[in-house]
Image: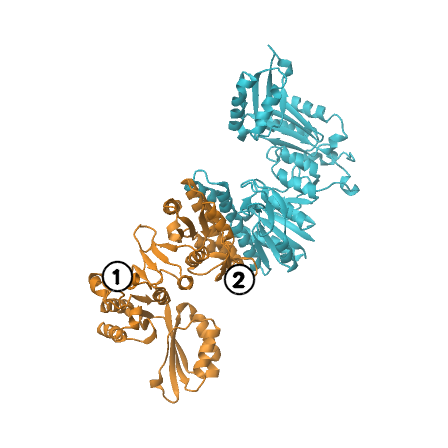
Chain colours: A orange, B cyan
């Protein structure tokens, strides 16, 4: 088998952790597999390098920041190779550039365009264990070193698995897999043994942090099976893969998981003249500021004096840009006021089962009502229902939904109501 | 003008030092020059990385060690570029590999084979300040990242200056230039305003640490003028260059400087049968162990019972290898014993003036005798006389020679006895 393994920064925090990772990698190799390892920077390295950068320049250029930060994974990759060599196995480390990770030129947030893994393949032919510095690549146009943005080491691992025709990709992390809800909120949450790409995509987009959206998109597009598992245990975690065979599809729950997201905020634009084109003016300005809008509500019922309110959610981090963009069009649109509210949260139920099961929305909303949770906004996809609620109600809402859809661990036997999908 | 500047680790120990270097670089650029900067790793970075390596493996592979250690210069190069950008100038950092520093594959001690500075040239055409990570390159054959061994950042700077057709290369260091002797031993030692490549080569080979031998060899071969100067002052330092024009040659002293070296040791092989071929057997064994022998004395006068003693000097660091090599041929050669003595030092007087001035040897030895220093061994080149003395006599010997050749600062007017070279 050919296996790509990815270890995050918490798995390589110090020399002892690196040695532990080395033993795990060697164990996989000893079973007769080809092994490629993608590694993040050690624990705090990236933060420390960022501190240094801020000391020499309050606003370092992205090209140089990438040059600086990529040193972090280079260090951990070399150290892991040494630790593996010390166990009597041959290992070679490669930078993203050497590994053939070709990206766009967008420093700090580059995307993988292509993988040209010639050097990796020849190292694998030599029976070497290959270590690749994650989070980095080389720009196709400028040949400069790039970093790939959040969650990028996972994406590197999946992209390499696809390019190398690996049998699967293991993502080692500090949690035991993907859960039916955040166990810190729902103690009875269960590990999901396997989940399809679409559901995992919706979960990542709804605030589940275990896998990054881009990584799941890549895995779905290239049909790479991904095994998310704990780096502190040998137990299986969650397989993210195509779920199509009879064997896999036996018993799908209606709802697979409840996700939540506290990183969003709500903007309400008060007193927008109810004139054709005003809504599009507003959202064109927001889009031009590169802000992702999630839910939108126009309170048609509250039209008074030919004016209405428009609300939408956006990442909290985009507050400044959004308010500036709206201020710039205030005169043109003629609205009265803008209210920014960061005290909201998003709760989502996700499951392919809802395609064949009517009544999911009703059951979700009834559970929220029974828990005394007021719904502020709603958005849906074919396999997801999301609501915005007040932040103080997020935990309550997640717990209520988890119970309503029979996801709690003690009900495990009932949960798998056969849907045949 | 096109200028290459090199700053060592002590010049970039922390964020403030990096900012100070940035101001100096910018000042050179502001005068209208093309500027290429070669930079070492920050202060203790290399030691810290080496510590990490030792924690994961007692004997890390050289390829991985190079991958690890090169992160150090990458970090300082990126930080310096940021600091320069912050002053309103455009700067771009490059790794050794990106800068086109092509080397042998000897990890940890690679040599520069070629420089292909395409990316640097195009950055200079864009009027950018170019920052190059020193001490590193890329192997011509394996394409792996290499480090260049001791003093290599200086060599990188000189090699880049040659490849870029730079007008000169500035080496910034923690001393004010090249001195007539080590000022810690001879308080009246003077800075040498300019010195020829040959004399500088002999000085580097005789223990003067300010410039590394390889760097001077490269500069001489490529006729690159090198300005060695303090990074803590704006005063001129020492120019190392071709000294051929009338203007330059006006007043050459007989002896330019006194150098010393405490890193050597002496091995005496006692009771070697005085048979043809025995000396060559011994030195073939030493050479096969890759040990550089400096002085050799065969005590012909002490032959007794058809046996003689052979003494030679070698780096102290080669003790173990030398003794092992000799033990392996003891039976074959039939010598009686080996004595290792690290308590020696080498004192050299260097000057092109001795080519045209007879009597230098006599004056040197008389001075040593007057100071009560016994000479143990002697070796000479066309422009150098070296003696091995007991370590406790090194300071006394350097002081005596410095005075005898009228190098002391108060005699400066007399020192420049015209020799016409």
Q: Is residue A413 left or right of residue A174?
A: left
- SS assignment at label 2: loop
Q: Classify B290 as above or below B127.
A: above
x, y percent for residue A265: 37, 71
For the image, the number of numbered tags is 2
Residue B28: image quadrant is bottom right
User: Image quadrant for the C terminus of chain A?
Assistant: bottom left
Q: Classify A98 as above or below A355.
A: above
Numbered label attached to residue A105 = 2
Q: Earlier in the sequence, mark 1 or mark 2?
A: 2
Q: Residues within 10 Å of mark 1 (few under 14, many from 20)?
A: many
Which residue is under mark 1? A189
Numbered label attached to residue A344 = none
On the same chain, marks 1 and 2? The answer is yes
Q: Is residue A386 left or right of residue B239?
A: left
- SS assignment at label 1: loop
């Amino acid at each position: 088998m050919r296996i790509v393994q990815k270890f995050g920064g918490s798995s390589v925090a110090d020399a002892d952790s690196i040695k532990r990772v080395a033993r795990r990698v060697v164990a996989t190799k000893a079973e007769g597999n080809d092994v490629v390892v993608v590694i993040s920077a050690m624990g705090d390295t990236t933060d420390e390098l960022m501190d240094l950068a801020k000391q020499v320049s309050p606003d370092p250029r992205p090209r140089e920041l990438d040059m600086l930060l990529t040193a972090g994974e280079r260090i951990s990759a070399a150290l892991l190779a040494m630790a593996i060599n010390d166990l009597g196995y041959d290992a070679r480390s490669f930078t993203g550039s050497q590994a053939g990770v070709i990206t766009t030129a967008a420093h700090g947030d580059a995307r993988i365009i292509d993988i040209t893994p010639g050097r990796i393949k020849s190292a694998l032919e030599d029976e070497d264990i290959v270590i690749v510095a994650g989070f980095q690549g080389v720009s196709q146009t400028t040949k400069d070193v790039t970093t790939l943005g959040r969650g990028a080491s996972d994406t590197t691992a999946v992209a390499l698995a696809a390019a190398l025709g690996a049998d699967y990709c293991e993502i080692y992390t500090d949690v035991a897999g993907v859960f039916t809800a955040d166990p810190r909120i729902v103690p009875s949450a269960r590990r999901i043994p396997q989940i399809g790409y679409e559901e995992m995509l919706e979960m990542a987009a709804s605030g589940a942090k275990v896998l990054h959206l881009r990584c799941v998109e890549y895995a779905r597009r290239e049909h790479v099976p991904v095994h998310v598992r704990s780096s502190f245990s040998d137990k299986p975690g969650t397989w993210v893969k195509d779920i199509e065979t009879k064997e896999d599809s036996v018993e799908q729950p209606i709802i697979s998981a409840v996700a939540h997201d506290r990183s969003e905020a709500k903007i309400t634009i008060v007193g927008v003249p109810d004139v054709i084109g005003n809504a599009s003016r507003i959202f064109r300005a927001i889009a031009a500021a590169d802000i992702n809008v999630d839910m939108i509500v126009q309170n048609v019922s509250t039209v008074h004096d030919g004016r209405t309110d428009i609300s939408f959610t956006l990442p909290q981090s985009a507050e400044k840009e959004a308010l500036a963009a709206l201020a710039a069009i205030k005169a043109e649109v003629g609205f009265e006021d803008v209210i920014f509210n960061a005290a909201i949260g998003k709760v989502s139920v996700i499951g392919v089962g809802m395609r064949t099961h009517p009544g999911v929305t009703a059951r979700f909303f009834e559970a929220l009502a029974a828990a005394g949770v007021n719904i502020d906004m709603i958005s849906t996809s074919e396999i997801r229902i999301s609501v915005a609620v007040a932040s103080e109600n997020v935990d309550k809402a997640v717990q209520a939904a988890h119970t309503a859809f029979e996801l709690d661990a003690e009900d495990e036997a009932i949960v798998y109501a056969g849907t045949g999908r």
